[in-house]
Image (cartoon, rainbow, N blue to C red):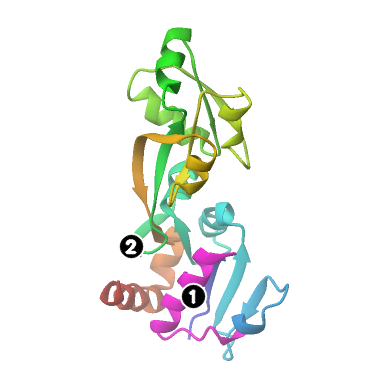
């Protein structure tokens, strides 16, 4: 049997992904006692799991270190990696939104420049370029909600689930950029060279989701 390497994000997305893989017949028991291990194998040695940061999943798949991966659509949009996006898995649903104080856009329009704090600079640029709006992008890696609170930015572009964090910090969703969810991605070469393992797995996933 051909060896299959699967990139999974650490955290909730990876856990949901593993549940789906197990429903498709993949032995994920090695993950139960993973501890701090980052590379794990099933009992046969034919399936390998690598545990990575969510934003790194597309890179491992693109480079062929992993044959397949499970990643959020928001990460795919930002990274723009040349991988095959095969399937919307239907979990990890949330929204990518512009958020800030209710009058943020009006005040920015009056000032002449919209300052956007975000973990997704490529998504932000594409979104506003399509609308012919020039923006000042401020790249942040954490707690982007802090941007408008301290005057670093007018608004943020970020993932929104319940919206509770926004409300607690006096902000609202001002615009919805898109809906996002978990996606199955495949390395372009692996889809051809390991078709006998990957294609049945894709079909099993389609039946389940």
- Residue 139 in sight in this render: no
Between residue 41 and residue 30, name the one nearer to us: 30
User: Which region is colored magenta?
Assistant: 9-30
Q: Is residue 202 left or right of residue 7?
A: left
Which tag is nearer the camera, tag 1 or tag 2?
A: 1
Label 2, residues with CA under 10 Å away: few <14, some 14-19, many ≥20: some
- Residue visible at 41% across and 78% down in the picture: 197
Location of the C terminus (image quadrant)? bottom left
- In the rendered view, tell whether residue 164 sits above or below residue 36: above
Which of the pair 178/28 is nearer the observer?
178
Contact between marks 1 and 2 (CB within 8 A): the answer is: no
- Secondary structure category for the residue under label 1: helix
Quarter of the image for residue 175 reads top left
Q: Nearer the viewer, residue 139 or 207?
A: 139
Tell me what residue is drawn at x 34 percent, y 48 percent. 179
Tell which residue pokes out farthest to the right in this image.
36
Horizontal arrangement in the rendering, residue 100 relative to residue 139 (left or right): left
Q: Secondary structure at mark 2?
A: strand
Task: Look at the magenta stretch and give its main secondary structure.
Answer: helix
Q: Earlier in the sequence, mark 1 or mark 2?
A: 1
Q: Residue under circle 2?
A: 87
Identify the residue under disc 1. Answer: 18
């Amino acid at each position: 049997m051909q060896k299959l390497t699967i990139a999974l994000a650490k955290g909730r997305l990876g856990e949901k992904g593993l549940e789906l893989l197990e429903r498709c017949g993949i032995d994920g028991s090695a993950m139960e006692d993973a501890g701090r291990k980052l590379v794990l194998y099933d009992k046969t040695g034919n399936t390998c799991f690598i545990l990575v940061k969510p934003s790194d999943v597309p890179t491992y798949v693109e480079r062929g270190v992993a044959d397949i991966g499970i990643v959020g659509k928001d990460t795919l949009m930002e990274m723009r990696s040349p991988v095959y996006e095969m399937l919307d898995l239907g979990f990890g649903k949330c929204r990518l939104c512009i958020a800030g104080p209710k009058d943020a856009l009006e005040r920015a329009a009056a000032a002449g420049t919209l300052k956007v704090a975000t973990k997704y600079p490529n998504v932000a640029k594409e979104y506003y370029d399509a609308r012919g709006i020039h923006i000042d992008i401020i790249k942040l890696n954490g707690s982007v909600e802090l941007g408008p609170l301290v005057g670093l930015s007018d608004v943020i572009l970020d993932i929104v689930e319940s919206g509770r964090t926004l409300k607690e910090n006096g902000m609202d969703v001002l615009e919805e950029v898109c809906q996002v969810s978990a996606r199955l991605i495949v390395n372009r070469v692996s889809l051809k060279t390991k078709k006998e393992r990957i294609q049945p797995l894709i079909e099993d996933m389609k039946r389940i989701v």
